Amino acid sequence: MNSRDDQIASIRERSGNLRADRLQECYEQIVTAYDKASVLDYLAQVVEERDRTPSDFRVLTNSETRHIREFNDDSYHWDFYCAELGRSVALAEKRLVFENLQRIRARGQPIDAEVPNFEPVIAAVDNLINAGFRPDVLCAPIGLFVSFAGDNSLDINWNASPREVLVLSQGVSLKILWSSRSIPLDQFVVFDSRHAVWTVKLDPLTDRHLTVAIGETAPPSPPDGVVFLAETVVKYEIRNRAAFYAVPVEGEPRDDYHLRDRA
């Protein structure tokens, strides 16, 4: 184990004054919320590693401290807090991927955000297919959600679960993932997810992607606290940039009054 794993193990061991039923309940709520919010399976090939040796991986983490009295008190409900903690790590994963997508050099005809025509997105799909790829994901800027959703020339399956799907005449279906104000993207990116790899170091205790530790605080922190920690140790790699096609967007949308934030 490395020093980070030692710290996590130490947090987990400090639970003598915490209700066992609430510990289990909070753990399950954090993990369930993370699993529901994570979009990794759409964005890349997922590789799991058990070697926890430090390397060039990123630690996506969120931790906070609460009072023991509140943690053990039946009058306090932790469902929403735990769900938000789990989702925060899933959002950090998406942010890491979108940071990489944002750096892909845009090419082809730009889309005018004020009067958008989405034909360049269809052309990007055709270009990837002609190059021998199988595009299956479309990441899109939230600022054009209203225009995109209202374009009658696009066949969008809004009932697809858990992500809406753009169905094209070429027999291609693209899962759509939208950016948000907190996870920006100012270009459309179509890609074949087989050519990106998301490597995650599994938690040594649970073999899960997400590490969760809940335990009492240790000196020099005050002795009446409970530490909540959720994190994952990951690396995202685009193995073949030719399988990614970014379409530039120019200008600003005319009106975002009805914009829906779908982060």
Image (cartoon, grey):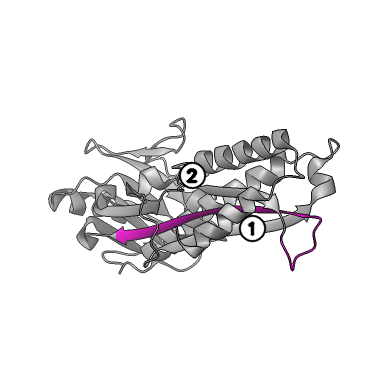
Look at the image and give the residue range highlighted in magenta.
218-237
Q: Is residue 43 left or right of residue 262?
A: left
Question: Disc 2 residue type?
Answer: Leu
Please say whether residue 235 is one of the residues in the magenta stretch: yes
Q: Residue at x 67, y 35 (%)?
A: 25
Q: Within 10 Å of the Cα at label 1, are there few (<14), some (14-19), or many (20+) other Cα atoms?
A: few
**Given contact means CB atoms under 8 Å apart, are the residues at marks 1 and 2 in contact?**
no
Whether residue 243 appears in this view of the structure is: yes
Please say whether residue 115 is one of the residues in the magenta stretch: no
Question: Disc 1 residue type?
Answer: Ser
Q: Quadrant of residue 136?
A: top left
Q: Is residue 70 left or right of residue 30?
A: right
Q: Within 10 Å of the Cα at label 2, are there few (<14), some (14-19), or many (20+) other Cα atoms?
A: few
Q: CA distance from mark 1 to mark 2?
A: 19 Å
Find residue 223 and report its horizontal and vertical position in percent. 80, 59
Question: Label 1: which residue?
Answer: 63
What is the magenta segment's predominant secondary structure?
Answer: strand
Find residue 153 and report its horizontal and vertical position in percent. 36, 41
Q: Which mark is in front, 1 or 2?
A: 2
Residue closest to the eye, 90 or 129? 90
Of the numbered discs in the image, which one, if any, rests on residue 205?
Answer: 2
